[in-house]
Image (cartoon, rainbow, N blue to C red):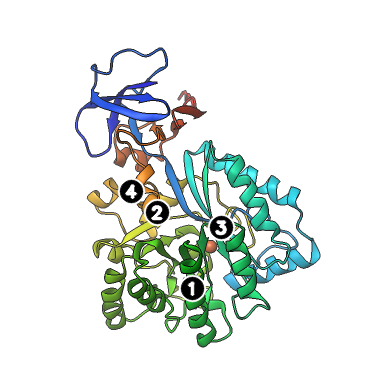
Amino acid sequence: MLVKNAKLRKKDGLYDITITGGKFGKIVPAGQGGADPETIDAAGKLVIPPYCDSHVHLDYAMTAGVPHHNLSGTLFEGIQIWADHKAQVPLTKEYMRENAIKTLELMRSYGVQHVRSHVDTGDENMLGVKTLLELKEEYKDKVDIQLVAFPQDGVYTYKKGAELLEEAVKLGCDCVGGIPHFEYTREYGVKSVEKTFELAEKYDRLIDIHCDEIDDEASRFLEVAATLAYESGLTDKVTASHTVAMHSYNNAYCMKLFNILKKSKINFAVCPHENTHLQGRADAYPKRRGVTRVKELLDAGLNVSFGQDSISDPWYPLGTGNMLWVLEFGLHVCQYMGYDEISNSLDLITENGAKTMHITDRYGIGEGKPADFLIIDAENDFEAVQYLKDVLYSVKNGKIIMKRDPAVVTLY
Ligand code: FE2
């Protein structure tokens, strides 16, 4: 395959990209790529690595309203509804597969090729874990799925939570999760973070913890996770998701916290839609935005990536799988709107997502790497973000897996 006249991010001029055996070959100035029977003319449009959604829940997706809708709009009602769902409308493999496939196909249509999905481990039959492990295999030519064993109801708060978490890791989850802010006590929370690290080291897994997803300035499990990441040497294998309590921390504490964050080199997965919706629910006016300090984290050189988190589930009723929409919203709510910030912001749903997922060795447009890329209907990053430009092609391992014809609009 040959992609000719491609505009590459942060580079002047146009390029021809050669692809052989599913991998990128030489990338040469436009006109020098030779001829290939399978040629796509990018015609000066942007060619970028595929979108990454570094935080989503495929096992919950498309279940909003079952058995009832979330009326308070809080995280805690969402957790209760999911428990009610499991008790009142028992989950089946077919139901979960159908919902997850519908979600993955949506994501695929928007150019997402890398997904990190958390999966609830609070089930002795491991239905979610087994179903998503099967889908991970089935989808490997279309979407790379990474699974996080996620103890939704707690590691120590939920009966057998620790054993079930370990069971899910043994079955093949790529990462170990946690939810320390939901545990009954601070002590359980700290112990649960330690358990997450213990399992990750025992089974050689990555870590992604739902960390401090609460508007409580006293929720301080991030410092525990970052310190363990630093002291264990697991560093960038560790991701803290949400960290919304950081929005409410006092600045003096944050100043101290950032010391260990920088040393730890951990990643941050941030979900702007979800947390703008869920947080600030206990506030009168003024209401907190409830998203973590994205600008400050990025300015400190830390890795931040965005995720959709929920697509029509007990926690969040909307969602489409379109990461550009997540990005555009996130830029607003995080006030990350400087010209350079917007111009470089595609990083948050591409390169930075790959860093969070620890897949940079096989991600990106470079000779020898898997030929995974998108052609966007835009000439530069800023235009792509401003106009939420369509993905025209999604190519994985040198094969076209999605093609979109742009809509034709006639104004009278
Ligand atoms: Fe989540």
| Residue receiving disc 1 | 198
| Residue receiving disc 2 | 358
Marks 2 and 1 sit apart, C-alpha to C-alpha, by 19 Å
Measured as percent of width and height from the top left, residue 49 is found at: 37, 39
Measured as percent of width and height from the top left, residue 166 is found at: 59, 68
Q: Residue furthest front?
A: 202
Q: Which mark is residue 347?
A: 4
Measured as percent of width and height from the top left, residue 207 is found at: 46, 64
Q: Earlier in the sequence, mark 2 or mark 1?
A: 1
Q: Earlier in the sequence, mark 2 or mark 3?
A: 3
| Foreground pick, 67 / 52 | 52
Amino acid type at mark 2:
His
Marks 4 and 2 sit apart, C-alpha to C-alpha, by 15 Å
Residue appearing at x 37%, y 66% in the figure: 234
Q: Is residue 108 above or below residue 310?
A: above
| Residue receiving disc 3 | 173
Residue appearing at x 31%, y 82% in the figure: 253
Frontmost of labels 4 and 2 is 2
Mark 2 crowd level (few <14, some 14–19, many ≥20, 10 Å Cα): some
Q: Secondary structure at mark 2?
A: loop
Mark 3 crowd level (few <14, some 14–19, many ≥20, 10 Å Cα): many
Is any atom of residue 62 visible in this view? no
Q: Earlier in the sequence, mark 3 or mark 4?
A: 3
Measured as percent of width and height from the top left, residue 385 is found at: 36, 43
